[in-house]
Image (spheres, grey):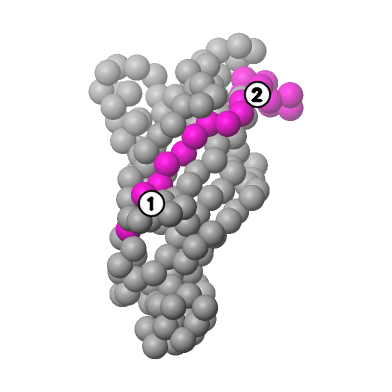
Amino acid sequence: MRFFEDIQIGQRRELGAYTFTAEAIKTFAAKFDPQRFHLDEEEGRKSLFGGLAASGWHVGSACMGLIVADNQRQAKETAARGDEVAIWGPSPGFRDLRWMKPVLSGDSVSFASEIVDKRTSSSRPGWGIVQAITTGTNQRGEEVYSITATAFVPMREAGG
């Protein structure tokens, strides 16, 4: 994980891909979003989606899982080099969550994040606030997911 000073606007990070299987779609939906077009192939075909569709919350959760896995990978690489690992703070929120196209059974969505803004925190000395837009693109090159999120990021030196 990087410190605030090491992060640049425009910096892009490929997070990986997740394939939405029928089983995973139904399992997630049964627990968290039990709507007919997420639970049954025929109901999905008859819906506006035209097939068994993943819940938008499933898409967001898959994205978050890839973000955490990439953060853990970066932290291990940083520690292996003998460098200090920056421990990020919580997110104060997000905005502009969009599900542009349905994610159907069999779709593989690749996620990437780009830094769009950064500033020092006026209320928390020693911390910066970073804003990133994370997108998901299916195997046909169609953008299916987008979210703008912020996170508290520690500065290497307090007051820096």
Q: Is residue 33 visible?
A: yes
- The number of numbered discs placed on residues in the rendered structure image is 2
Q: Amino acid at mark 1?
A: Gly
Residue 17 at x, y = what percent? 32, 50
Q: Is residue 89 visible?
A: no
Of mark 2 and mark 1, the one earlier in the sequence is 2
Q: Is residue 113 magenta?
A: yes
Majority secondary structure of magenta residues? strand
SS state under label 1: loop
Residue 3 at x, y = what percent? 49, 21
Q: Amino acid at mark 2?
A: Arg
For the record, the magenta segment spans 108-127
The quadrant of the image that shows the C terminus is: top right
Q: CA distance from mark 2 to mark 1?
A: 32 Å
> Which dot marks residue 2?
none
The residue where tag 2 is placed is 119
Q: Is residue 23 magenta?
A: no
Residue at position x 59%, y 44% from top? 148
SS state under label 2: strand
In this orientation, which residue lies closer to the viewer: 67 or 132?
132
The quadrant of the image that shows the N terminus is: top left
Q: Where 98 sits versus 133, above or below?
A: below
Left or right, 24 with respect to 48, comes to left
Residue 108 at x, y = what percent? 32, 58
The residue where tag 1 is placed is 141
Residue 105 at x, y = what percent? 34, 71
Left or right, 15 with respect to 97, comes to left
